[in-house]
């Protein structure tokens, strides 16, 4: 699939914390995709050797992979915001989000990028919940929690997408330029809800593309009760801020 026919430059942002088992495979797969995508890894001081593996891979692809090292675990949301600022400073037109644990298949990136590059959408979401439930290796309790979170979020915010917390997406730079990063406070899965909601409320075109999500086989999940609680209350905050025109 040709994904850069318009000449758009694309950056894939990959936050990492203790992803030594997976990160090399992810980076090499992205480097092999069409379009010569660039990658920015934002590492939160991983103690397991993730940074060293990324640094070794940077030497092989010095013009296409960059590493930002942060001294401690600062969270997913701040990692993406730092990546967004990097993308805007360096003139990237399209910006992708992707996990480092292979739950997102890097080979799906062209399918997310193509609608944005072709100007059919401003934000494309790799969705687990269109054309059926497309998740592998999740326990039933986790599936129910995730699916219920989507229903809960849509009821409160009216956000017209099914997979509200997906972290696999492609965003046009004009969306990021319209969002005041200093006002984004989410730092867990609710970060994805907030970016989607802000983009939608500003009139940008959202599109869901079906993907298959495979639960990590190496490393540990980053899900926690604090992340769930943040998401529960964040949707109400977003709704109220929207009603009072404070987004």
Image: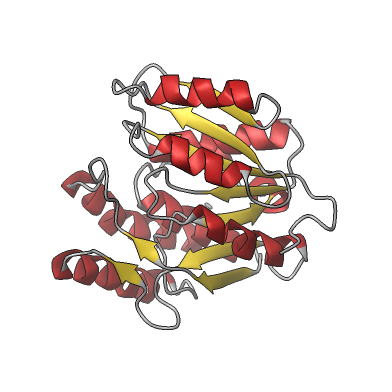
Residue occupying the far top of the picture: 71
Query: Residue 213: percent from the left, percent from the top?
Result: 38, 63
Q: Quadrant of the N terminus?
A: bottom right
Question: On the rendered structure, is 232 left or right of 40?
Answer: left
Question: On the rendered structure, is 154 left or right of 94?
Answer: left
Give the residue at x 51% y 21%: 56
Nearer to me, 26 or 191: 26
Query: Residue 179: percent from the left, percent from the top?
Result: 61, 47
Vertical comparison of 17 with 107: above or below: above
Nearer to me, 210 or 174: 210
Question: On the rendered structure, is 70 left or right of 13?
Answer: left
Q: How many discs mark residues in the rendered view? A: 0
Query: Residue 159: percent from the left, percent from the top?
Result: 47, 71
Give the residue at x 60% y 62%: 112
Nearer to me, 107 or 149: 107
Q: Is residue 198 visible?
A: no
Q: Quadrant of residue 236?
A: bottom left
Q: Quadrant of residue 39?
A: top right
Q: Is residue 166 visible?
A: yes
Give the residue at x 23% y 69%: 143
Vertical comparison of 90 with 219: above or below: above
Question: On the rendered structure, is 245 left or right of 110?
Answer: left
């Amino acid at each position: 699939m040709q994904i850069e026919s318009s000449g758009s430059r694309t950056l894939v942002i990959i936050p990492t914390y203790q992803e030594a088992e997976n990160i090399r495979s992810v980076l090499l797969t992205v480097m092999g995709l069409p379009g010569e995508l660039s990658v920015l890894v934002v590492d939160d001081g991983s103690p397991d050797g993730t940074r060293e593996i990324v640094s070794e891979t940077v030497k092989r692809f010095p013009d296409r992979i960059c590493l930002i090292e942060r001294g401690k675990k600062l969270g997913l949301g701040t990692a993406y915001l730092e990546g967004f600022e990097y993308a805007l400073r360096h003139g990237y037109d399209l910006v992708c989000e992707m996990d480092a644990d292979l739950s997102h298949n890097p080979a799906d990136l062209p399918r997310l990028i193509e609608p944005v590059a072709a100007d059919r959408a401003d934000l494309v979401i790799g969705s687990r919940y269109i054309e059926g439930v497309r998740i592998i290796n999740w326990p039933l309790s986790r599936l129910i929690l995730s699916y219920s979170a989507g229903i809960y979020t849509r009821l409160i915010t009216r956000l017209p997408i099914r997979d509200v917390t997906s972290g696999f997406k492609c965003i046009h730079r004009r969306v990021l330029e319209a969002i005041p990063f200093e006002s984004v406070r989410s730092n867990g899965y609710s970060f994805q809800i907030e970016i989607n909601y802000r983009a939608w409320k500003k009139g940008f075109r959202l599109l869901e593309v079906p993907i298959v999500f495979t639960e990590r086989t190496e490393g540990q999940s980053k899900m926690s009760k604090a992340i769930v609680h943040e998401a529960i209350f964040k949707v109400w905050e977003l709704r109220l801020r929207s009603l009072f025109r404070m987004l």
